[in-house]
Amino acid sequence: MQDITTITVRLPREDKETLMKYAEDHDLSASQIVRQLIRHYLFRCNILENY
C-alpha cells in the first residue's frame, strides 16, 4: 500500500464554492478533483518522468 500524506490548500472562498459545486454536480469529492488536477499538472510538466 502506498504512503498517504496530507497537503493543505488555501483557496479564495469563491474558488472553494465553485469546486464544491462542481464536485457535488459530478458526484465526486473535492479531494478527488484536487488529486486529479495535481496528477495532470505533474504529468503535463513532465515532473513525474524526471523523479
Image (cartoon, grey):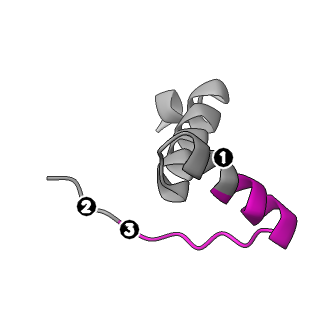
The tag on residue 7 is none
Judged by depth in the image, the label closer to the viewer, 1 or 2, is 1
CB under 8 Å between callouts 3 and 2?
Answer: yes
Q: Secondary structure at mark 3?
A: loop
**Kind of residue at badge 1:** Tyr
User: 1 left or right of 12?
Assistant: left
**Kind of residue at badge 2:** Asp
Visible residue check, residue 6: yes
Question: Residue at (22%, 53%) from the top-left corner?
Answer: 2
The tag on residue 22 is 1
- Where is 19 relative to 27, above or below? below
- Where is 3 relative to 34, above or below? below
- The residue lying toward the viewer, choosing from 39 and 49, is 39
Q: Is residue 19 magenta?
A: yes
- Where is 18 relative to 22, above or below? below
Q: CA distance from mark 1 to mark 2?
A: 28 Å
Q: Position of residue 1 (x, y in %)?
A: 14, 53
Which residue lies under the disc numbered 2?
Answer: 3
Question: Residue at (65%, 58%) from the top-left corner?
Answer: 20
Q: Position of residue 19 (x, y in %)?
A: 69, 54
What's the magenta region?
5-20
The tag on residue 5 is 3
Judged by depth in the image, the label closer to the viewer, 1 or 3, is 1
Q: Position of residue 40 (x, y in %)?
A: 58, 32
Q: Position of residue 12 (x, y in %)?
A: 84, 70
